[in-house]
Image (spheres, rainbow, N blue to C red):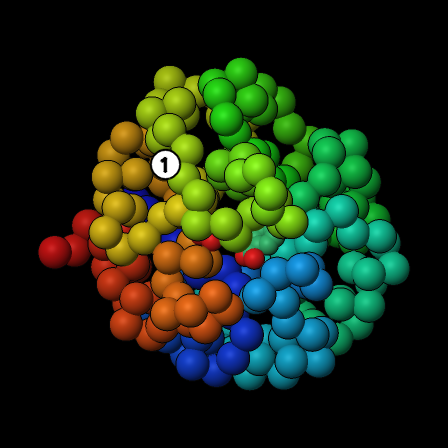
């Protein structure tokens, strides 16, 4: 089966239309105020409601959110899943509370960091944030992709962190990932998605020349 692709940090029609046209499997909206990709529930809601039902699934990204924050977003934005930066028990509680599939993000620096069990639907395996960053992801920072090669993943997972059109095929080969997630690597400036880079990334991930 083709490698599946998530384009994260969608904030406008240019990025959304490019991700849909390229055949992305998921798009992500970032509801974290310290991200250059932060989007308001109103804007995300308008974008999400304009999407075709056959298009990518819509994932909402939250960093240590309260239930009220998630509820406010869900009141405005039709989402198909939640990407959560928090610990395992909290991610499982969010899944139970809102009844949506949850992907828990895990920052990896060594093989010992790879989760052995999981109470949610998926994992986003990405590099641990570099020192000095004020956000746990979206840092254009890669980790050693060979760490995941022999890992027995407890649930389906996505590879993320520092992926670009130029390195994504090598990252897939080295990691064994069957799904990838990108934000910075398809932007012309922080928070500004490039239609050409989105197209190139999806093509490269799927093995097209
Ligand atoms: O994109 C962000 O700004 C962001 C902010 C806070 C947490 C996660 C964020 N993005 C996620 O980080 C990874 C990798 O991003 P990048 O390609 O290295 O920029 C990916 O899962 C994004 O969804």
Decide if residue 189 is in sight here: yes
> Where is residue 187 shown, x and y percent of the image?
39, 66
The residue lying toward the viewer, choosing from 96 and 89, is 89
Element assignment for label 1: loop
Decide if residue 27 is in sight here: no
Q: Tally the numbered discs.
A: 1
- Quarter of the picture holding the N terminus: top left
Quadrant of res 176: top left
The residue lying toward the viewer, choosing from 53 and 106, is 106
> Residue at 44% of width from left, 43% of height from top?
141
> Where is residue 129 shown, x and y percent of the image?
56, 40
Outermost residue toward the right? 68
Number of other residues with Cα within 10 Å of mark 1, as a class: few under 14, some 14 to 19, many 20 or more: many
Above or below residue 16? Residue 169 is above
Quadrant of res 148: top left
Quadrant of res 28: bottom right
> Residue at 66% of width from left, 37% of height from top?
120
Residue 58 vs residue 69: left or right?
left
Outermost residue toward the left? 209
The residue lying toward the viewer, choosing from 108 and 3, is 108
According to the image, label 1 marks what residue?
177
Residue 154 vs residue 177: left or right?
right
> Residue at 84% of width from left, 52% of height from top?
66
The residue lying toward the viewer, choosing from 197 and 104, is 197
> Residue at 49% of width from left, 36% of height from top?
127
């Amino acid at each position: 089966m083709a490698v599946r692709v998530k384009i994260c940090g969608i904030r406008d029609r240019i990025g959304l239309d490019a991700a849909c046209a390229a055949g992305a499997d998921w798009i992500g909206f970032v509801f974290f105020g310290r991200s250059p990709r932060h989007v308001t529930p109103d804007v995300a809601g308008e974008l999400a409601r304009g999407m075709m039902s056959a298009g990518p699934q819509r994932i909402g990204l939250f960093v240590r959110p309260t239930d009220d924050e998630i509820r406010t977003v869900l009141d405005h934005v039709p989402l198909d899943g939640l990407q959560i930066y928090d610990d395992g028990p909290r991610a499982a509680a969010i899944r139970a509370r809102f009844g949506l599939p949850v992907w828990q993000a895990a920052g990896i620096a060594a093989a010992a960091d790879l989760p052995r069990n999981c109470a949610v639907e998926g994992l986003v395996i990405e590099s641990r944030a570099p020192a000095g960053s004020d956000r746990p992801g979206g840092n254009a920072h890669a980790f050693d992709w060979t760490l995941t090669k022999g890992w027995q993943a407890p649930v389906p997972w996505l590879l993320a962190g520092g992926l670009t059109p130029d390195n994504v095929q090598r990252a897939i080969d080295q990691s064994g990932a069957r799904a990838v997630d990108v934000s910075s690597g398809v932007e012309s400036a922080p928070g500004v998605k490039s239609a050409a880079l989105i197209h190139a990334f999806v093509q490269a991930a799927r093995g097209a020349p």
